[in-house]
Amino acid sequence: MHLEMRDAYMPDPAFDAWLGGSREDHLTEDEDFQTWLEWVRETTARGVAVRRARVFSVPESDYIRWEHFISHANVAAGEDIRWLSRRDTTGIAFPGNDFWIFDDAQVLVQHFAGDGTIRAQWRELTTDPGVLELCRSAFEAVWERAVPHGDYKPT
């Protein structure tokens, strides 16, 4: 499970190209992205679900619209992605940071800089039961309300 709650992340040349009007798939040459897609394919082939939920502001930022544009590759690899407007999250208790939950036992917390960059030392792995339960419940509440990728159309 992966919950993303920012309206923009680290700068990316493919995003810059998209902003410039290109609608080509500039990530086919991105080694890190292709490695990610291969991991998703291998993981889902073993029967493990890979779920990502995105909470975003409306109107969507250019970055969120770009993420929607490129997410077809994630979905094709087996990742299940859903989208939820921030205005539809009232009543959900959220942790303060994006996170991953692995094997329902570990939480990887991601601490981003204001410009959306992240460094390895800004990642925190925890098995704290309270953090795990907060993250699990936030993710599942978002998942229940969110729109599947194929049904969501950015404005």
Image (spheres, rainbow, N blue to C red):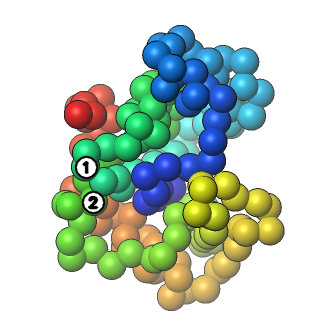
Q: Earlier in the sequence, mark 1 or mark 2?
A: 1
Q: Nearer the viewer, mark 1 or mark 2?
A: 1
The reply to whether the C-beta atoms of the residues labelled 1 and 2 are less than 8 Å apart is: yes
The residue that disc 2 covers is 86
Q: Is residue 55 left or right of residue 29?
A: left
Report which residue position mark 1 lands on: 58
Q: Can residue 124 be seen by looking at this rendering?
A: yes
Left or right: residue 121 compared with residue 135: right
Q: Residues within 10 Å of mark 2 (few under 14, many from 20)?
A: some
Q: Residues within 10 Å of mark 1 (few under 14, many from 20)?
A: some
x, y percent for residue 117: 67, 55
Q: 11 or 29, which is in the foreground?
A: 11
The disc at residue 145 is: none
Tell whether 117 sits left or right of 71.
right
| Callout 1: SS | loop
Q: Amino acid at mark 1?
A: Val
Element at label 2: helix
Q: Quadrant of residue 108?
A: bottom right
Give how far across and how far down residue 48 sits, in percent: 55, 46
Q: Quadrant of residue 40?
A: top right
The residue under the point 24% across, 65% down is 89
Residue drawn where x is 53% and y is 82% of the image: 131
